[in-house]
């Protein structure tokens, strides 16, 4: 243990799914109290709360009012699908800065039954043509100048990769989804844990070619929370707490640097690659060292490009890498053994902490039926369109 | 012939309809929206430049599910117009994976999007070069 290390002391996710009888604060409180209990601490120990609830718009103060008002600062964060990772990083940075020794990060969302998110709305038509907005458009542009829907945007991102490097097809993207749904059958906390055949996936309702419904992330309810501590704080705790603690070897957040086309079709590649490079350098770990990866498969088409962006394969080799079986749970670099966003579900602000929980669960050796044996190092990745990329590299405690 | 108005202000109508971009005079970065400064080099001077009307499909999707009121299916694409990327629908083409292909050559085409008060709004898309 080095003196400036930051550790995850306690972490928990709720089961993802439908909670008609719970409100956002109930879910946040469930995850928070479970994470505190998992770490063996209480709200009295917590010196900072970083809270994310992107769609619901609630504040961390509502959570405090239910689980403990101690006067600590709350940072309410929003960063699209990287909201949870951003909350985690706020707590991490405060500990790194020496301001606090114990911080709490919480992400929560209620999305069960939500339809298409982002761009899924067309504004009202007016009686006369009036240019409006930054494009001087006389009518809504969604559907007339391309699509703003997430399934459509990420479909194009996968197709663009195929155009650049070849090797992709509807069937290949569907096979990625087949893998993640197969993985989900071992995850009791997944919103959906049903295995699909390739034929079922390809024959399901087409949302935005080549993404059919099971190839899209599932809207659902859920929350996740993590308690982070400094190295000095961890040393004051029990041997058991130290043994179960998970080291954050890198915590990185990037946005997309300007490149040609990035304001036409979002470029989710460069900022992910930049974040990965920084994360590997900071952690002193290479992609070949990773025992498992949870990456942002908001759509099956997205998972493919991130194999490349995270440098799990050689540049341009994502299709071959997948076809080799490397990313199945018994492969060289298991990816999304939780089932991924396509089956575990994607309660937006919770996702960036739930991914870290999944990795931590394996590093602690507590993942039960889906345990990746002997896992020592893992990486959790999220991306929010706009864009923001969060990467956390996690290591098992040496104790 | 009724009066016409372009769907967006970066579509120029006339005998040879085409798109125009705001090009940063310092670094050459191109943008289609109203600018405060250049996202690439932060300069604030721009000039209008014509964008080539022919290009190739670099990415596409066939949208089958969209917000209420948007006719589906339609093809959304990113067109590489000889170095300038453009977002557009592919039009005058079946919205099927058999008819639309990556790398397909396309050209700008316009159509009447609607009529209000005797004024036609003219939209644009890209159609296959046959
Ligand atoms: Zn510039």
Image: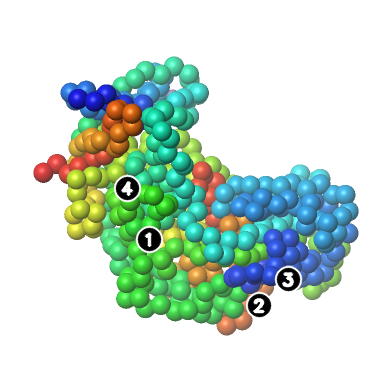
Residues at marks 1 and 4 touching, judged by CB atoms closer than 8 Å: no
Mark sitting on residue A244: 3
Q: Secondary structure at mark 2?
A: loop
Q: Residue at x 42, y 68 (%)?
A: A214
Q: Residue under mark 3: which chain is it in?
A: A
Visible in this render: residue B61?
no
Mark sitting on residue A366: 2
Question: Where residue A363 appears, x then y in whole percent?
Answer: 63, 71
Q: Residue under mark 2: which chain is it in?
A: A
Q: Is residue A178 left or right of residue A244?
A: left
- In this view, which residue lies farthest toward the left? B130
Residues packed near mark 4 inside 10 Å, few (<14), some (14 to 19) or many (20 plus): many
Residue position marked by numbered label 1 in the rendering:
A207
Q: Work out whether residue A127 or residue A299 is closer to the camera in this orientation and state it.
A: A127
Q: Work out whether residue A174 or residue A237 is closer to the camera in this orientation and state it.
A: A174
Q: Secondary structure at mark 1?
A: strand
Mark nearer the viewer, 3 or 2: 2
Q: CA distance from mark 2 to mark 4?
A: 45 Å
Q: Residue under mark 1: which chain is it in?
A: A
Q: CA distance from mark 1 to mark 2?
A: 37 Å
Q: Is residue B25 above or below residue A148?
A: above
Residues packed near mark 1 inside 10 Å, few (<14), some (14 to 19) or many (20 plus): many
Q: CA distance from mark 3 to mark 2?
A: 10 Å
Q: Is residue A344 left or right of residue A86?
A: left
Q: Work out whether residue A106 or residue A367 is closer to the camera in this orientation and state it.
A: A106
Q: Is mark 4 within 8 Å of ligand 1?
A: no
């Amino acid at each position: 243990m080095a003196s400036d290390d930051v550790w995850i002391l306690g972490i928990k996710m709720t089961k993802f799914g439908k909670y008609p009888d719970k409100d956002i604060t109930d879910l946040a409180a469930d995850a928070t109290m479970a994470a505190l209990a998992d770490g063996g601490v209480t709200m009295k120990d917590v010196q900072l709360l970083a809270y994310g609830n992107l769609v619901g718009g609630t504040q961390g103060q509502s959570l405090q009012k239910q689980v403990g008002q101690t006067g600590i600062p709350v940072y309410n964060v929003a960063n699209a699908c990287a909201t949870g990772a951003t909350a985690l990083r706020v707590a991490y940075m405060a500990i790194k800065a020496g301001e606090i020794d114990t911080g709490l990060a919480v992400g929560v969302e209620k999305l069960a039954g939500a339809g298409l998110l982002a761009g899924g709305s067309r504004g009202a038509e007016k009686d006369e043509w009036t240019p409006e907005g930054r494009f001087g458009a006389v009518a809504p542009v969604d559907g007339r100048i391309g699509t703003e829907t997430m399934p459509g945007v990420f479909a194009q991102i996968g197709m663009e990769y195929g155009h650049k490097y070849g090797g992709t097809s509807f069937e290949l993207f569907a096979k990625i989804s087949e893998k993640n749904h197969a993985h989900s059958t071992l995850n009791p906390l997944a919103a959906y844990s049903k295995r699909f055949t390739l034929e079922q996936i390809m024959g399901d309702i087409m949302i935005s070619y080549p993404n059919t419904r099971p190839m899209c992330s599932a809207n659902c309810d859920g929350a996740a929370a993590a308690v982070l501590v400094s190295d000095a704080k961890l040393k004051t705790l029990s041997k058991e707490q130290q043994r179960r603690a998970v080291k954050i070897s890198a915590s990185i957040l990037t946005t997309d640097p300007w490149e040609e086309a990035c304001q036409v079709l979002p470029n989710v590649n460069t900022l992910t690659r930049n974040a990965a490079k920084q994360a590997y350098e900071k952690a002193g770990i290479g992609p070949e060292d990773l025992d498992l990866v949870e990456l942002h498969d908001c759509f099956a088409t997205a998972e493919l490009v991130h194999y490349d962006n995270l440098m799990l394969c050689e540049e341009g080799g994502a299709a071959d890498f997948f076809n080799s079986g490397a990313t199945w749970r018994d492969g060289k670099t298991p990816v999304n053994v939780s089932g991924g966003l396509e089956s575990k579900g994607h309660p937006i602000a919770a996702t960036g902490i739930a991914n870290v929980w999944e990795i931590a669960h394996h590093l602690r050796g507590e993942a039960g039926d889906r345990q990746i044996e002997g896992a020592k190092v893992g990486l959790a990745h999220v991306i929010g369109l706009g864009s923001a990329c969060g990467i956390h590299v996690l290591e098992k405690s040496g104790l | 012939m009724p009066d016409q108005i372009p769907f967006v202000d970066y579509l120029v109508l006339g005998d040879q309809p085409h798109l125009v971009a705001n090009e940063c005079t310092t670094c050459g970065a191109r943008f289609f929206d109203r600018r405060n400064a250049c996202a690439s080099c932060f300069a604030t001077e721009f000039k209008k430049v014509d964008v080539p009307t022919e290009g190739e499909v670099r990415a596409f999707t066939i949208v089958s599910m969209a917000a209420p009121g948007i006719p589906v299916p339609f093809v959304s694409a990113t067109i590489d117009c000889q170095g300038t990327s453009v977002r557009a629908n592919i039009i005058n083409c079946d919205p099927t994976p058999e008819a639309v292909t990556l790398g397909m050559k396309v050209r700008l085409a316009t159509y009447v999007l609607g009529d209000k008060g005797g004024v036609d709004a003219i939209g644009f898309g890209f159609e296959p070069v046959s």
